[in-house]
Image (spheres, rainbow, N blue to C red):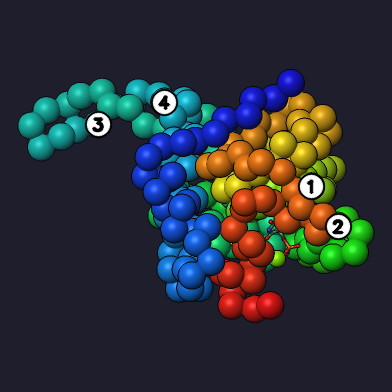
Amino acid sequence: MSKLVVVDHPMIQHKLSILRDKNTGSREFRALVKEIGMLMVYEITRDLPLEEIEIETPVTKTRAKVLAGKKLAVVPILRAGLGMVDGILELIPAAKVGHIGLYRDPETLKPVEYFCKLPQDVEEREFLVVDPMLATGGSAEAAIQLLKDRGAKNIRLVCLVGCPEGVKMVQEAHPDVDVYLAALDEKLNDHGYIVPGLGDAGDRIFGTK
Ligand SMILES: O=P(O)(O)OC[C@H]1O[C@H](OP(=O)(O)OP(=O)(O)O)[C@H](O)[C@@H]1O
Ligand SMILES: O=c1cc[nH]c(=O)[nH]1
Ligand SMILES: [Mg+2]
């Protein structure tokens, strides 16, 4: 079974509380999603492998550590996942960005695919699938399956707010995919919204209803 990690750094918890507040407007909401996305990935990438290379400082030759291993790709689940991309790219500017377009049918709560564009070297990359919300888990499960169908082997899921139902669905369908959350909330309500949650992330980022 994969890992579930709740990245509960105090800075992340503080920003998340402002994000949850219904009085937080789109401009601040966007800034916070970006910042929390960056902070989460900073924590998550602690385990990236390093290698030593030889460099020359202004004083002497020395050996210094640089990142090694697989190259990263970030894959936001459209639309709301887009809000996490810029912060992650500030941290990892060389990462490629794939896009998976899914919306959740409001009646069935099942994900509907409308777009998929991924980097060409799918098998060589380590993927971070990003989306602020992990509710029923249907969208994340489908996005991960799309990546796997195209050859991806190394995938992690990074969401801001999740709930037990969504975590269970992803872990059962994809036991090889570790799940990272900033908060594990209590449950889903009858409309498939996370409680207490933060409402509709895409609508709050983009100012739509
Ligand atoms: O775990 P699930 O039950 O699948 O729900 C989570 C999905 O719902 C939201 O997207 P939404 O369908 O609202 O699309 P949007 O990002 O375009 O607003 C959210 O950003 C996730 O992608
Ligand atoms: O609480 C939820 C559930 C699904 N999608 C959202 O944006 N919020
Ligand atoms: Mg939405």
Dot 2 lies on which element?
loop
Do the CB atoms of the residues marked 1 and 2 lie less than 8 Å apart?
A: yes
Q: Residues within 10 Å of mark 2 (few under 14, many from 20)?
A: some
Dot 1 lies on which element?
loop
- Labels 4, 3: front one: 4
**In 3D space, how far apart are the residues under numbered discs 3 and 2 (Cα atoms)?**
54 Å
Q: Earlier in the sequence, mark 4 or mark 3?
A: 4
**In 3D space, how far apart are the residues under numbered discs 3 and 1 (Cα atoms)?**
49 Å
> Hey, what amino acid is under mark 3?
Ile
Residue 199 image-quadrant placement? bottom right
Query: Where does residue 118 sit, x and y in percent of width and height?
Result: 70, 54
User: Which of these two is toward me, 81 or 209?
Assistant: 209
Write down which quadrant ligand 2 falls in: bottom right
> Hey, what amino acid is under mark 2?
Leu
- Labels 4, 2: front one: 2
Residue denoted by label 1: 136
Do the CB atoms of the residues marked 1 and 4 lie less than 8 Å apart?
A: no
The residue drawn where x is 90% and y is 64% is 107
- Labels 3, 2: front one: 2
> Hey, what amino acid is under mark 1?
Thr
Q: Residues within 10 Å of mark 1 (few under 14, many from 20)?
A: many
Residue 42, above or below 25: above
Residue 51 visible here: yes
**In 3D space, how far apart are the residues under numbered discs 4 and 3 (Cα atoms)?**
15 Å
Residue denoted by label 2: 109
User: Which of these two is toward me, 86 or 33?
Assistant: 33
Residue denoted by label 4: 50
- Labels 3, 1: front one: 1
Label drawn at residue 55: 3
Q: Earlier in the sequence, mark 3 or mark 1?
A: 3
Indicate if the residue with disc 3 has its beta carbon within 8 Å of ligand 1: no
